[in-house]
């Protein structure tokens, strides 16, 4: 019996421990080094450095997943979402295998452009926008008056997540609703069966509208400490990559809690190009719609 995400099990404990380490352990670990890492930089420069976390995180995550895809061990394959289909690089049809490797090369190119060229430009634009609006840059101080308390940190993380989720849900739904926008977003939907590379397989217009703007919106709205911003970036990155991994791992730290969106929601969205417009949470899909086609799909798959 395959353990499902959100199903009480040993793996849920593993997921919970990871979340606790992120929420409580990471601040304790980082605080003694925060000033030495960023104290010699201006706040704008330090914020820019933090905003460059995604390229490093993406590369490390891909390297971790590469042997999982390559080895095809039954322990991992039991959690493959589209179990009825082979991985495209293992498909018996030559044209499907060739198409996959062509798509992979394009993904590497798009990821390089988006993460190493476009992201730095968007980061600079966000910082300049905040300055022009008279918004204070995030603090990098580590004294007791500046470093976020546990309550403040968790509160800001929740506000960041809800604000980003609303922005992503709205922009993502608009990308599907209007042909003038979908012509850019459809590049992302070239993946019908996800691998982790699909996470950054975006046209640059799509990257700006559905990834860059919701994130900038969140950090401009929520006045938080630089460490809280960094902490939230790690969580959001993990959720985005986990959305596209192709496996429904029950030990994922971003899936175990009540209002978390499941990995198979985004897999369904790619395979059917319908619904499930949210990112990390179920909130706005439940309120404004997005599960109409997904729920029958889940019920049908229980028979597989």
Image (spheres, rainbow, N blue to C red):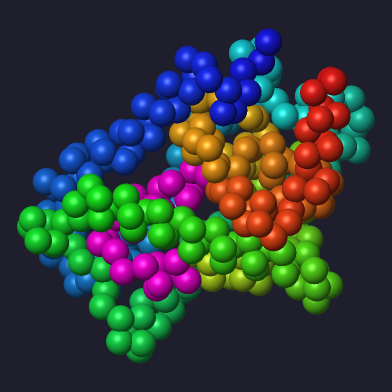
In the image, 6: left or right of 190? left
**Quadrant that contains the N terminus:** top right
Find residue 106 and report its horizontal and vertical position in percent. 70, 53
Query: In the image as oriented, which residue stretches furthest toward the front?
Result: 287
Span of residues in magenta: 216-241
Find residue 69 and report its horizontal and vertical position in percent. 64, 27
Whether residue 284 is visible here, answered yes or no, is: yes
Q: Is residue 258 above or below residue 153?
A: above
The kind of secondary structure the magenta stretch mainly shows is: helix
Q: Is residue 5 above or below residue 297?
A: above
In the image, 226: left or right of 78? left
In front here: 113 or 46? 46
Q: Is residue 255 above or below residue 293?
A: above
Q: Quadrant of residue 140?
A: bottom left
Q: Within the magenta stretch, is there residue 234? A: yes
| Residue occupying the point 78% across, 33% down | 298
**Quadrant that contains the C terminus:** top right
């Amino acid at each position: 019996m395959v353990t499902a995400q959100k199903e009480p099990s040993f793996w849920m404990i593993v997921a919970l421990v990871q979340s606790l380490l992120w929420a409580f352990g990471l601040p304790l670990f980082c605080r003694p080094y925060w000033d030495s890492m960023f104290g010699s930089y201006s706040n704008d420069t330090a914020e820019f450095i933090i905003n460059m976390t995604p390229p490093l995180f993406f590369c490390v995550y891909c390297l971790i997943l590469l042997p999982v895809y390559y080895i095809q061990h039954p322990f991992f394959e039991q959690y493959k979402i589209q179990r009825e289909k082979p991985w495209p690089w293992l498909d018996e049809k030559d044209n499907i295998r060739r198409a996959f490797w062509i798509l992979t090369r394009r993904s590497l190119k798009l990821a390089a452009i988006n993460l190493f060229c476009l992201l730095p430009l968007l980061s600079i634009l966000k910082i300049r926008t905040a300055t022009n609006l008279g918004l204070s840059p995030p603090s990098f101080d580590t004294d007791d008056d500046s470093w976020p308390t546990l309550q403040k940190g968790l509160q800001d993380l929740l506000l960041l997540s809800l604000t980003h989720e609303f922005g992503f849900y709205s922009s993502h739904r608009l990308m599907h609703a209007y042909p003038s926008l979908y012509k850019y977003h459809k590049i992302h939907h070239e993946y019908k069966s996800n691998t982790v590379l699909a996470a950054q397989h975006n046209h640059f217009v799509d990257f700006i509208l559905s990834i860059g703007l919701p994130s900038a919106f969140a950090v401009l709205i929520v006045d938080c400490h630089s460490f809280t911003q960094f902490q939230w970036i790690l969580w959001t990155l993990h959720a985005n990559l986990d959305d596209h991994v192709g496996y429904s791992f029950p030990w994922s730290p971003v899936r175990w809690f009540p209002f978390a969106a499941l990995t198979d929601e985004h897999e369904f969205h790619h395979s059917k190009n319908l619904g499930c417009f949210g990112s990390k949470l179920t909130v706005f899909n439940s309120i404004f719609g997005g599960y109409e086609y997904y729920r029958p799909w889940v019920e049908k798959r229980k028979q597989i």
